[in-house]
Image (spheres, rainbow, N blue to C red):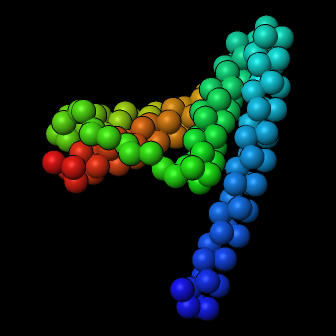
Amino acid sequence: MTEKSWRLYAVMQEKKTKAIELLSKLADAEATEIEVDSKHVAASKNWVVRMFYDYGLADAKRHLEIATMVRGWLEQGKPSVGKIDIPADMLEKEANSETNVASLVKQILGSVDDADAKALLEGILADEGRHEQGLRALRQRALAKN
């Protein structure tokens, strides 16, 4: 290896080490959020408060899972995803359905003034966007593998 290659390798290793360190901190922060959100969901009698904290709890659990998975990839190498076992056209249809739901929620948001209702609806909108992106990414993988 040339000196330039060694330097590039060292920089990449340093970035990887930093990412692993930050992912560990992220996992710790999400674990704390899970603990706090769980307590608030259990303690509150107000359904709106419980709903917001329940959404936060679900997100924190998902984020902890993602942070742990990505840290594992960096530490051990990314495992093979394997064959996408849902047809690309089905994934496209479901992604379009997410887009349609998001469009409907946007229309509803234009007709609602209540701050709590808007916040809940914006949560739906964000979820639908994430679902759509995920389905489209799976579709691309399905097309690439076939």
Residue at 75% over, 27% down: 34
Q: Nearer the viewer, residue 68 or 124?
A: 68
On the image, which quarter does residue 59 sit in? top right
Single out the residue that lies furthest toward the bottom: 3
* Residue 125 visible to the viewer: no
Q: Position of residue 13 (x, y in %)?
A: 65, 69
Residue at 66% over, 36% down: 64
* Residue 120 visible to the viewer: yes
Q: Position of residue 88 (x, y in %)?
A: 20, 41
On the image, which quarter does residue 83 sit in? top left
Single out the residue that lies furthest toward the front: 1
On the image, which quarter does residue 58 sit in? top right
Residue at 50% over, 36% down: 127
Q: Nearer the viewer, residue 138 or 85?
A: 85
How many marks can you see?
A: 0
Q: Horizontally, is 123 left or right of 131 in the view?
A: right
Residue at 78% over, 10% down: 42
Q: Position of residue 100 (x, y in %)?
A: 32, 37
Q: Position of residue 55 (x, y in %)?
A: 64, 26
Image height of 36 relative to 70, above or below: above
Single out the residue that lies furthest toward the top: 45
Q: Horizontally, is 7 left or right of 41 in the view?
A: left
Instruction: Quadrant for the N terminus, please.
Output: bottom right
